[in-house]
Image (spheres, rainbow, N blue to C red):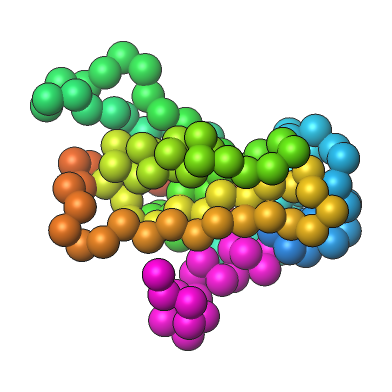
Amino acid sequence: MNTDPQRDPETYAIIGAAMEVHRELGNGFLERVYHDALEIELAHRNIPFSREHPVPVLYKGHLLGTPYRPDFVCCGSIIVELKTIKSLTDIESAQVLHYLKATGLQRALLFNFATPRLEYKRFILSDHQPRPSRIQPPSDSPS
């Protein structure tokens, strides 16, 4: 996994925004509070985003009736998922990896705001992973 902020400035900018939200609010709020605060912080930092934009999911070439709605898609290519749970587990990691595979995107961030220090994981799918689709943010995106 790449840990050089110069090689992936977009994810590091998003992590910085999430850290600022956690620094300002601390832990203990409901997940939706962090969604609202992160939306404000992303806009303040001019990080393009779409919130809960429906993403189609395909099964064997067929469009499924239930789209996936990521918490955020930033910069048109980074899934951002927020949690407020005791600790991140393999279940949340698997969820994010499935979202990457379903959307065809390569990068994701998973944040947990319920801990005294912001907990986060960064995910990058390698180039050899299948990419069935791409997300196109709505033209009226708030970013």
Residue 64 at what x, y percent from top left?
A: 26, 18
Residue 5 belongs to the span the image colors magenta: yes
Q: Is residue 137 above or below residue 125?
A: above
User: Number of callouts in the render?
Assistant: 0
Residue 49 appears in view: no
Q: Nearer the viewer, residue 49 or 124?
A: 124
Judge from the rendering whether residue 47 lies leftward or rightward of residue 18; answer left or right.
Answer: left
Looking at the rendered image, the quarter that the C terminus falls into is bottom right
Q: Looking at this rendering, what residue extends furthest in the left direction?
A: 61
Q: Is residue 142 above or below residue 75?
A: above
Judge from the rendering whether residue 45 lies leftward or rightward of residue 125; answer left or right.
Answer: right
Q: Nearer the viewer, residue 100 or 45?
A: 100
User: Which residue is at 51% across, 80% downward?
Assistant: 5
Q: Nearer the viewer, residue 96 or 70?
A: 96
Q: Is residue 60 above or below residue 65?
A: below
Magenta span of residues: 1-17
Residue 71 at what x, y percent from top left?
A: 56, 39
User: Which residue is at 48% across, 82% downward?
Assistant: 4
Q: Looking at this rendering, what residue extends furthest in the bottom direction?
A: 6
Residue 12 appears in view: yes
Looking at the rendered image, the quarter that the N terminus falls into is bottom left
Judge from the rendering whether residue 139 lies leftward or rightward of residue 30; answer left or right.
Answer: left
Residue 95 at what x, y percent from top left?
A: 45, 36
Residue 3 belongs to the span the image colors magenta: yes
Residue 77 at what x, y percent from top left?
A: 38, 55
User: Which residue is at 11% across, 26% downward?
Assistant: 61
Q: Looking at this rendering, what residue extends furthest in the front direction?
A: 90
User: Which residue is at 41% across, 29% downward?
Assistant: 68
